[in-house]
Image (cartoon, grey):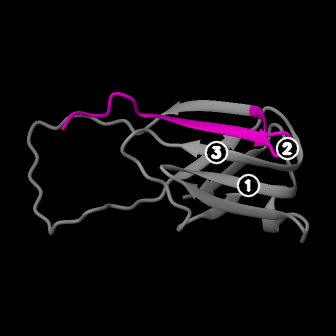
Amino acid sequence: RDPPQDDRWYVEGRVADGNVQVNWGVTTGLVSQSLQTVSIEYARFRTLSTGFLVQLISAVTVDGAGFVTLVPPPGYLLSCDGFVPYIMPGIGSSSSSSSKLECESIRPGLKLSFERSLLRAGDLYGFLV
């Protein structure tokens, strides 16, 4: 099997009020090299699951509500089943008790929504999916 032609990941940030795009970014996926000889024996698995650490830094501050959409390259399917907010300053449980953070699966990617929160420009944010 050849490596995928397009292995880019697309990340988009929007403000909930008016659904206005405020950030976006593209990054390359996993680096893969072809092997000369491969032999693997295993039972038939339909799927293989792994976790991804997603990190981002916003170019703008979003106060109130917004969301980040993560779209993987072809062949990947993301799920919120293993969602862990790793570094989320000002969002979710790390901020005020009224702050809300939710992960929603939107095949093949996901949407991370926040309300009553502050996403600060220049701060590192990270989560596991």
Residue 93 at what x, y percent from top left?
A: 80, 68
Q: Do the residues labelled 3 and 2 touch (CB within 8 Å)?
A: no
Give the distance between the C-alpha atoms of the residues marked 1 and 2, in whole angstroms.
15 Å
Question: On screen, 2 above or below 67?
Answer: above
Q: Is residue 65 left or right of residue 47?
A: right
Q: Nearer the viewer, mark 1 or mark 2?
A: 1
Residue 102 at what x, y percent from top left?
A: 71, 62
The residue wearing badge 3 is 69
Quadrant containing the N terminus in the rendered view: top left
| Res. 58 image quadrant | top right
Q: Which of marks 1 and 2 is nearer the N terminus?
A: 1
The residue wearing badge 2 is 120
Residue at 82%, 46% (x, y): give it: 16
The residue wearing badge 1 is 113
Give the distance between the C-alpha atoms of the residues marked 1 and 3, in whole angstroms.
9 Å
Q: What residue type is labelled 3?
A: Thr
Query: Which is nearer the eye, 40 or 117?
Result: 117
Give the distance between the C-alpha atoms of the residues marked 3 and 2, in whole angstroms.
17 Å
**Secondary structure under the numbered disc 2 in the rendered image:** loop
Residue 99 at what x, y percent from top left?
A: 86, 64
